[in-house]
Image (cartoon, grey):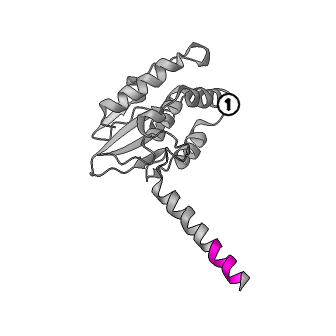
Amino acid sequence: MVQRAQLLLNRCVMMLLMAALIGCSVDTLNIYMPPRGIQSIHQEDLKRALWNLERGADSMLWWTNRASQVNLSATDIHGCFLHEGRTSDVLTIVAVSTPIEVATLASMGKAVDKVETSHGWQFCTQEKGTSRIESFDNMLYVSDIVDVESSFVDVNFTLWAQQIRESMKQQGL
């Protein structure tokens, strides 16, 4: 009989805990929720990415791994990854595989991760020295967004993050 009472008490406590958790918002539980959208673009991420890429990481391999981490889908085009939007319209962002451009692309990809967007976003890298991709209807080059000639020691990371956020806003994020 005592065991049955104990079991009943345990169930009541569990049900009360579940009811309390279901009724509480994330803010009241003090659970950290990482920022999404353009708020997820941070200078610290850009510094870390640029540092790794300038230290000799293979930019195409690094980009492929990073695209997978931010839930971008590989396409049939080498170096291109897609975030699908609500419509079939797609904006293609193209970067040359230089450290600063690939780091910018990764930051933009992170901004659309787990965000429902009105149009799709396709992020592509191309090898340095090849002719510019011109085969997409709606395109934007990373070199039109940020100064791609800077090196790690010359970059104003705060300004760089701000430029990416502003560009993403202009493009509908």
The answer to whether residue 97 of the structure is visible from this angle is: no
Residue at the extreme bottom of the image, as rendered: 1
Up the image or down, 60 lies above or below 68; here it is above
Q: Nearer the viewer, residue 88 or 114?
A: 114
The image quadrant that residue 140 belongs to is top left
Which quarter of the figure is the N terminus placed in? bottom right
Q: Position of residue 154 (x, y in %)?
A: 57, 13
Total of numbered circles in the picture?
Answer: 1
Secondary structure under tag 1 reads loop
Residue 153 sits in quarter = top right
Toward the right, the furthest residue is 2
Q: Position of residue 159 (x, y in %)?
A: 47, 18
* Residue 125 among those drawn in magenta: no
The kind of secondary structure the magenta stretch mainly shows is helix
Q: Which residues are magenta?
A: 3-10
Residue 6 among magenta residues: yes
Name the foreground residue: 123 vs 26: 26
Q: Which residue is tagged 1?
A: 56
Give the percent coordinates (x, y) of residue 37: 42, 39
Instruction: Write the residue at 52% across / 43% down.
Output: 33
In the rendered view, tell whether residue 111 sits above or below residue 152.
below
Q: Amino acid at mark 1?
A: Gly
Q: Residue 61: where, in percent of width, then height? A: 60, 43
Q: Is residue 158 above or below residue 91?
A: above
Residue 81 appearing in the image: yes
